[in-house]
Amino acid sequence: VYRTYITVSKGMTSIDVANMLEKAKIIKSASSFSKKVEDKKVSSYLQPGSYEVDSNMTEDEIISKLFKKRK
């Protein structure tokens, strides 16, 4: 199992996050992850902060952790 912390900065995009996750071996494909984010229409909800993610998480779990609607 690969585990990492990723830090999302203001202004980062879902593509930036997908590339970090792929490089850390958390996801297999940055492009398919980005497409899933776009399909779910949540790309504008990427929240700055630090997140712990691991390779046992599904893409949907990672997306719901990083892309949250502001209350």
Image: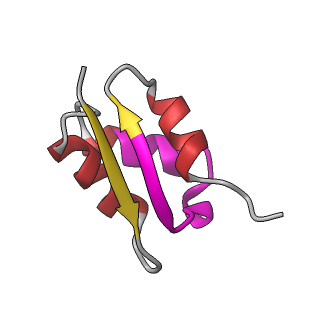
Please tell me whether residue 5 is drawn above or below residue 43 in the rendered image. Answer: above
Q: Nearer the viewer, residue 38 or 52?
A: 52
The image shows residue 41 at horizontal and vertical percentages of 62, 52
Q: Residue at the spot x=24%, y=37% of the render?
A: 29
The image shows residue 46 at horizontal and vertical percentages of: 55, 62
Quadrant where the N terminus is found in the figure: top left
Which segment is the magenta one? 33-52
The colour mode here is secondary structure
Q: Is residue 37 magenta?
A: yes
Count numbered badges in the picture: 0
Asked whether residue 21 is drawn in magenta, I would say no
Q: Considering only vertical position in the picture, is 56 above or below 70? A: above
Q: Position of residue 64 (x, y in %)?
A: 60, 41
In the image, is 31 to the left or to the right of 68?
Answer: left
Q: Residue at x 35, y 30 (%)?
A: 54
In this view of the protein, which residue sits in the foreground, 27 or 53? 53
Q: Residue 69's image quarter?
A: bottom right
State the residue at coordinates (37%, 19%): 56
Instruction: Give the quarter of the figure containing the C terminus.
Output: bottom right
**Left/right of residue 25 with respect to residue 69 in the rendered view:** left
Q: Residue at x 41, y 43 (%)?
A: 52
**Residue farthest to the right, as pictured:** 71
Q: Position of residue 50 (x, y in %)?
A: 44, 58
